[in-house]
Image (spheres, grey):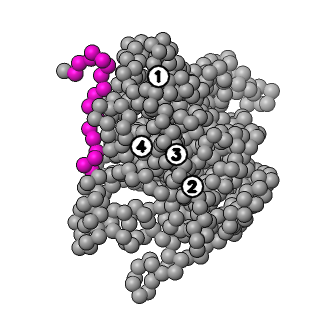
Amino acid sequence: MSSTAAVDSRTQAHLTGVRRRTVAQAVVEYLQVQYSELDGERRRLIPGLYGIFGHGNSVGLAQGADEYGVDFPHIQGKNEQSMVHAAIGYARATNRAATYACTASAGPGSTNMVTGAATATTNRLPVLLFPADIINNRKGDPVLQQIEHPIERDVSANDCFRPVARYFDRITHPAQLLSTLPEAMRVLTDPVETGAVVVCLPQDVQGDEFDFPETFFAPRIWPIRRRPAAEDEILDAIEIIRSAKRPIIIAGGGVRYSSSRDELATFSAEFGIPVAETFAGKGSGPISELNVGGLGVTGTFGADQLADQTDCVISVGTRLQDFITASHSLFQNPDVRFVHLNVNSFDAHKMGSFPVVGDAKLSLTAIHQGLAAAGYHAEASYTDAIAAAQKATAERLAHDLQVFPGEIMSQAQVVAALNAHTGADDTLVLGSGGVVESIHKAWDASNRTEIHFEYANSCMGHEIPAGLGARLARPKAPGDVFVLIGDGTYYMQPTELITAVQEHLKIIVVVIDNSGHQCIWPLQVAKGGAGHEFGTQLRERNAATGRLDGAVVPVDIAANAASMGAAAWSTRTLAEFEAALLEARAVEGRPAVVVAHTEPWRYLTGNGTFWDVGAAMTSERPETLEAGEKHRAGRQTQRYYGATVPPGGQVF
């Protein structure tokens, strides 16, 4: 056809009402016109594509993004799992209103994303994954990186996404996109169903062409709606709370995602109810004497004291995982009752709670109005109990922050220094290791630093890419994104520092270097007997014992980070650490890494709560048997909490 006779493809589409595209091209063009809307704010739902390209997607989805990507940047991840963690960080920073798409080649590239998918789903955060899949037509079976199932020929390695995905599909014909992609967008923007959305793209199908209806590519807005709870649930919840003398509120991640921090603070203040925080809810409680800090195994001593005797637990947007409930042993009042405000009915019914299923902001407001009309307030003497609990917490923290003779700086001291150097414009990202307890128990959130806490999947390696995702979400926002990790996490996945250098994005990574997975050491000692650490230290193999109990392996993390393009400091005193923080603040356009060498075995004082793990119940070691007996005794404190019913209600 001559150039004069050629018809522009877009004009042709307008004339025919269809747009001929490959599957990959259609995916790219569809994603570019999808928008979310939350509380009146509209944004691109999928603003770009994280991808590592191999034979499974480099001539398919990569080609589509290259030719048809308009304002649809590709970010070159360094590890497939990390790409998903970056998308999670982006989703959290946008309050679940947007996320990145992620693609990887077939086989190990795609299965590397499974852990990220699990992390997204457990945290109720949206991510969109396009793992490449095997050749659909099977003419060349077995193809490179194919897992062959002898009796289920339609199964591939990508089927391992099924248990960790909130939505899963495999495209075997181009027309399937017409129903699959809208359904994927629906799940991503549904506060109840959101999590990992996985759409597998077989390699040959990515390049298959199809006449897609032009209307398929029309811009679409996906509203993220606030749905109110049923009126009778609100009324019954009011009656349950009215009868409580010493209630306590558990603030979970749902407080953040529903933007109900102000409503919670007003609720707490008017009725004199203390607020304890989960991991995802850290920083969402009120700035007042009624905020008693973290709750549970890594919570404050005072919060756990109050929880032990409370007669009513008001949960707001939490999964009530075992660290928070001390494996169902924390609430010991025999008459304790539970009310749970949650958008998700599955979570709202946990621990026999009376469910209030709806948006947390709307539910808090409605219950507040009813309690205020009834003149409710917690009993007067509760104020003294809360003050005593706060005093007990402060005394333990003061003890933990002291200088211990013969020891170098402690992790608690480093975290306190970081706390003092951050403010409301900053973001703190963390997710695993010993820093979990330090932040949950000892971080003073009154400075309003935004805290992105991943402790649903507790995924080591999540933090650096998640910090990068948070920065991507707010590239020009004031303040810094701090990532707080241990050396064990750094070794697992530091290479997204290179991506940060590529993209000229600034994050500050604080690495607590104590030469190993030291937070596991006290658990082993407590459950297995004094002195019996195994496999948690960064040590050389000892020729005499044949075990990893030789000399500490020297690793210069700062030098390693510098080799990837980061500005880096190695510090051994608090003065050096604080000076490095100030210098890191001044860095522009690239990541900064501050390493803090800390006392290996100095941790915060425990609060005595029980946590159920698989402790050994038989052994040849007397100390292990003794630890097993103590664990059995702890299991005796675990409770079954029957269904909470409103006054006058009946259980048949």
Q: Nearer the viewer, residue 253 or 476?
A: 253
Mark 4 vs 3: CB contact within 8 A: no
Residue type at tag 2? Ala
Mark 4 vs 2: CB contact within 8 A: no
Q: Which residue lies under the disc numbered 2? A: 398
Characterize the local packing of mark 3: few (<14), some (14-19) or many (20 or more) Cα atoms within 10 angstroms.
Answer: some
User: CA separation, marks 4 and 3?
Assistant: 12 Å
Q: Which residue lies under the disc numbered 3? A: 391
Residue visible at 38% across and 50% down in the picture: 609
Where's the C terminus, which quadrant?
Answer: top left
Residue visible at 55% across and 26% down in the picture: 269
Residue type at tag 4? Gln
Q: Is residue 287 above or below residue 212?
A: below
Mark 3 vs 2: CB contact within 8 A: no
Residue visible at 69% across and 39% down in the picture: 424
Mark toward the start of the polypeptide (3 vs 2):
3
Where's the N terminus, which quadrant?
Answer: top right
Q: Which residue lies under the disc numbered 4? A: 305
Residue type at tag 3? Lys
Characterize the local packing of mark 2: few (<14), some (14-19) or many (20 or more) Cα atoms within 10 angstroms.
Answer: few
Q: Is 282 left, or right, of 348 in this rendering?
A: right
Q: Which residues are magenta?
A: 635-651
Q: Which residue lies under the disc numbered 1? A: 377
User: CA separation, marks 1 and 4?
Assistant: 20 Å
Q: Is residue 481 above or below residue 244?
A: below
Mark toward the start of the polypeptide (1 vs 4):
4
Q: Residue furthest bottom?
A: 544
Mark 1 vs 3: CB contact within 8 A: no
| Residue 645 magenta-highlighted | yes
Does dot 4 land on a helix, a strand or a loop?
helix
